[in-house]
Image (spheres, rainbow, N blue to C red):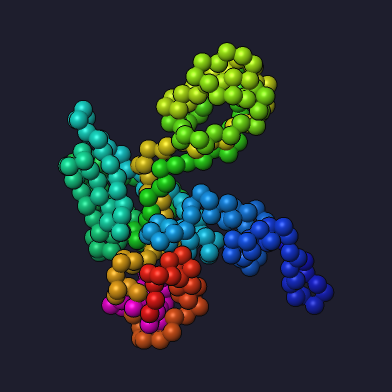
């Protein structure tokens, strides 16, 4: 929150969100409103920062206020009844498996042939069993190094419960121990076979909920469900292989014009500029034992 005084200078007024942000070492960004700041604070739980590649990207993106958008939707077109397709994005390498042992395609995202989202989608479309569609939230010219695998867990914050003693949630399967009911009278005790007022049952696989008492049709439920991973998301953040000594040397000894510069294209040895220094600080905060000059 802010106010502007007569001479044109901007002064800021601290709110409860700012106090909460200090507890998580996440200060408000310049000109950031309360809604955006609250979303960044909440993302610390949904998308935690840690020493994994995804955790690093989550942390750096949160520090700069970036949000992931759906970029590429991948579908398996095989009619083979034994197919068990898997989409794995790890260490900036995308692998498509038709079965656990049948690798359909594999691409290193820094390669020139797949270094944009459009090029990667074209490569996937040339495979036998998979197709890829570039989503409208991106142009397709973005670097494929900014792709991350969408979390397999999606959050539902305020789904309305219908006025029925037997209903299905909109999404399933449900992750165990994640359901929170607003109406604790109707949903008081979980039991396999409801027998009295306040009893309810849940089929985690199908999302079917049964009760004895009738919900009023106005209360809400929050839960987490397992999403079928078919979407790659994009963030304007890309880090080199975190296990590479070359990458660490690059981060700490070169001045870069942007985050996509490679060690081969570094300008000259120098202290990192402010943008890169903030990324380094975020990396150091999350895994100080693994990072250094």
- Magenta stretch encompasses residue 130: no
Tell me if 183 is positioned left or right of 98 in this view.
Answer: right
Which image quarter is the C terminus in? bottom left
Front one among 22 and 105:
22
Q: Is residue 36 visible?
A: no
Q: Is residue 254 magenta?
A: yes
Displayed quadrant of residue 76: top left
* Residue that sits furthest to the top in the current view: 195
Horizontal side of 60 relative to 264 (left or right) equals: right
Q: Residue 218: x percent and y percent?
A: 67, 26
Q: Is the residue 13 above or below the residue 227 in the image?
A: below
Residue at x-position 37% and y-position 69%:
290
Residue at point 48%, 72% (across, down): 281
Residue 21 is situated, as x and y percent measured from the top left of the image, at: 63, 60
Nearer to the camera, 120 or 166: 166
Q: Horizontally, is 40 left or right of 127 in the view?
A: right
Q: Residue at x 21, y 41 (%)?
A: 100
Q: Is residue 236 above or below residue 123?
A: below
Question: In this view, which residue lies farthest toward the right?
Answer: 6
Q: Quadrant of residue 142?
A: bottom left
For the magenta stretch, what is the residue range? 249-265
| Figure quadrant of the N terminus | bottom right
Where is residue 199 drawn, in percent x and y? 59, 19
């Amino acid at each position: 929150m802010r106010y502007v005084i007569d001479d044109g200078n901007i002064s800021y007024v601290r709110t409860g969100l700012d106090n909460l942000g200090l507890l998580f070492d996440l200060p408000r960004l310049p000109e950031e409103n309360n809604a955006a700041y609250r979303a960044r604070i909440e993302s610390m739980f949904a998308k935690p920062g840690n020493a994994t590649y995804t955790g690093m990207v989550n942390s750096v993106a949160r520090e700069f206020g970036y949000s992931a958008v759906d970029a590429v939707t991948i579908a398996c077109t095989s009619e083979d009844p034994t197919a068990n397709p898997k989409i794995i994005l790890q260490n900036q390498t995308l692998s498509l498996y038709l079965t656990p042992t049948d690798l359909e395609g594999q691409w290193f995202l820094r390669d020139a042939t797949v270094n944009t989202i459009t090029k990667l989608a074209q490569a996937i479309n040339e495979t036998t069993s998979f197709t890829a569609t570039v989503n409208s939230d991106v142009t397709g010219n973005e670097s494929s190094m900014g792709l991350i695998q969408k979390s397999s867990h999606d959050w539902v914050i305020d789904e309305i419960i219908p006025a029925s003693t037997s209903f299905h949630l909109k999404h399933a399967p449900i992750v165990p121990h994640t359901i929170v009911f607003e109406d604790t009278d109707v949903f008081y005790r979980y039991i396999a076979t409801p027998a009295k007022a306040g009893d309810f049952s849940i089929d985690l696989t199908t999302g079917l909920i049964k009760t004895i008492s009738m919900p009023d049709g106005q209360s809400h439920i929050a839960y987490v469900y397992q999403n079928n991973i078919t979407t790659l998301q994009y963030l304007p953040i890309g880090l080199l292989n975190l296990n590479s000594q070359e990458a660490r040397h690059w981060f700490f000894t070169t001045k870069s014009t942007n985050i996509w510069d490679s060690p081969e294209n570094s300008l000259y040895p120098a202290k990192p500029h402010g943008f890169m220094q903030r990324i380094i600080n975020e990396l150091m905060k999350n895994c100080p034992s693994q990072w250094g000059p």
